[in-house]
Amino acid sequence: MKIKNKISIAVAVGFLALGMILSNYPGSVSSGILSGIFAVGLSMLFVSLYKHFKYGEGVEQDERTRRVMYRAMAGSWVATLILTTVLMFADRVNIRLDIRGALSIVFFFMVFTFSALNWYFEEKEDM
């Protein structure tokens, strides 16, 4: 097991232990914070175990996988810049967004476009 996965599992177990310890003292921590601690611990544990069982000692990277990733990143960056331009002009048509809404739209759009473009370029044969 890679050292990175071991550290991540240890931190996840630490979050879960902290959540169990704090749950024994009612009223010391709000239930929202307590459930957040458990959620972070469980998600870190599941992601670490998933990565370990799927990839083992790591993913082999060659020139093609790096080129695919860089091309997907560049396409996602350009699409996100176009989205921010559209969001800047959204005020002209009376669409009101607060900063949290605008940043969440940009963030999820960037993640989605990178994932979609990465998948598209991985499936393409002539990269």
Image (tube, rainbow, N blue to C red):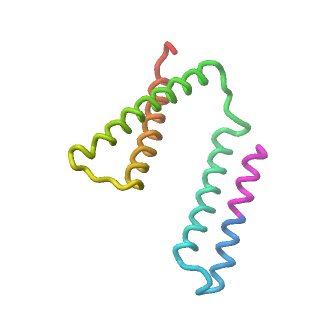
Q: Position of residue 68 (x, y in %)?
A: 54, 23
Q: Position of residue 44 (x, y in %)?
A: 63, 56
Q: Which picture quadrant has residue 90? A: top left
Q: Position of residue 38 (x, y in %)?
A: 59, 68
Q: How many marks?
A: 0
* Extreme-top residue of the structure: 126
Decide whether the magenta segment is chiefly helix, strand or loop.
helix
Q: Is residue 9 left or right of residue 67?
A: right
Instruction: Give the quarter of the image for residue 113.
Output: top left
Residue extent of the magenta highlight? 1-13
Q: Residue furthest front?
A: 92
Q: Is residue 30 above or below residue 123?
A: below
53 on left or right of 109? right
Looking at the picture, does residue 18 appear above or below residue 83? below
Which residue corresponds to the image point at 42% horizontal and 50% vertical from the top-left? 104
Q: Residue 66, percent across and down?
A: 61, 24
Quadrant of the snapshot with the N terminus = top right
At a point 52% along the width and 15% down the height, the residue shown is 127
Q: Nearer the viewer, residue 24 or 107?
A: 107
Residue that appears at 55% across and 71% down:
35
- Residue at left offset 61%, top offset 54%: 46
Q: Nearer the viewer, residue 112 or 61?
A: 112
**Quarter of the view holding residue 63:** top right
Up-down relation of residue 90 to residue 81 (above or below): below
- Along the line of sight, the residue nearer the viewer: 84 or 3: 84
From the viewer's perspective, is residue 50 above or below residue 66? below
Is residue 106 shown in magenta?
no
